[in-house]
Image: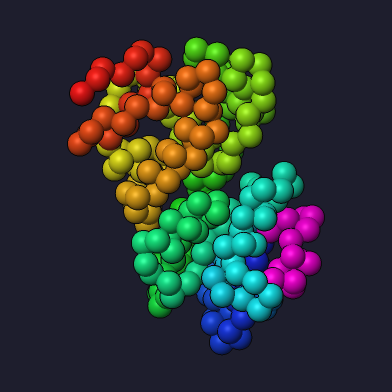
Amino acid sequence: MNRQILVVEDEAPIREMISFVLEQNGFNAIEAETIEQAQAKIKEPYPDLILLDWMLPGGTGVKLAKALKQNEYTRAIPIIMLTARADEDDKVKGFDAGIDDYVTKPFSPKELIARIKAVIRRVAPTSLEETIEFHGIKLDPVSHRVFINDKSLDLGPTEFRLLHFFLTHTERVYSREQLLDNVWGTNVYVEDRTVDVHIRRLRKAIAGEGHENFIQTVRGSGYRFSGKTQPSG
């Protein structure tokens, strides 16, 4: 069965062009022109991915993305923001809302398909492995659950993959580029800044009893996941 992609775009020519490109590349396109139409179409069976414009009748794509990521039934749906807003602050707002990627207009069909495939790859379920335990953190790749001191933790798919990588590669420093390659995959159109955004979200998620201190910033080098106290200076 082909993957279903919801295209939320109020400009008909752009929406139709995107849908055509998706169909040509083996996806099933579902179209929505407004926030209300999008909300009506985000139901079971849920779309595999959402392409979301920033400015829409009835609200903003950022607001919709935030609402979807806060809903337990829709939070796992990957979202790619499509917008002419290329400022760094706008990108950070988008990532803070929970989007998985940010594509600025104008974009080529080839780039769009590459971004879609990359996002789908990196949010795919983690392969079956044994449960990992580290200083009170327990990660179960089979059930895709994380616990801290037996308390369930709510993590998005990217944060889950990032934590999984850290837990299987403790005490080593990784640059942003290395984290992108290992967590997001090689040849993926993602900026280094994206790593910082997801690191911040993961720190916030595991905060409590000092767990946020496990993710250590190594100035000029990158990040380390360690249960040891970080040297000062």
Q: Position of residue 174 (x, y in %)?
A: 29, 32
Q: Quadrant of residue 168?
A: top left
In the visual, does 179 lie left or right of 82?
Answer: left
Task: Name the residue located 50 percent from the left edge and 12 percent from the top edge.
Answer: 135
* Number of marks in picture: 0
Residue 185 visible in the snapshot: no
Q: Position of residue 68 (x, y in %)?
A: 67, 54
Considering only vertical position in the picture, is 179 above or below 36? above
Does the stretch in magenta take in 87? no
In the visual, does 39 lie left or right of 198?
Answer: right
Quadrant the N terminus occupies: bottom right
Q: Position of residue 146 (x, y in %)?
A: 61, 26
Considering only vertical position in the picture, is 53 above or below 13? above
Considering only vertical position in the picture, is 21 above or below 103? below
Task: Name the residue located 61 percent from the left edge and 58 percent from the top edge.
Answer: 65
Quadrant the C terminus occupies: top left
Q: Position of residue 56 (x, y in %)?
A: 61, 76
Residue 6 visible in the snapshot: yes
Magenta range: 35-47
Task: Name the residue located 41 percent from the left edge and 22 percent from the top edge.
Answer: 214
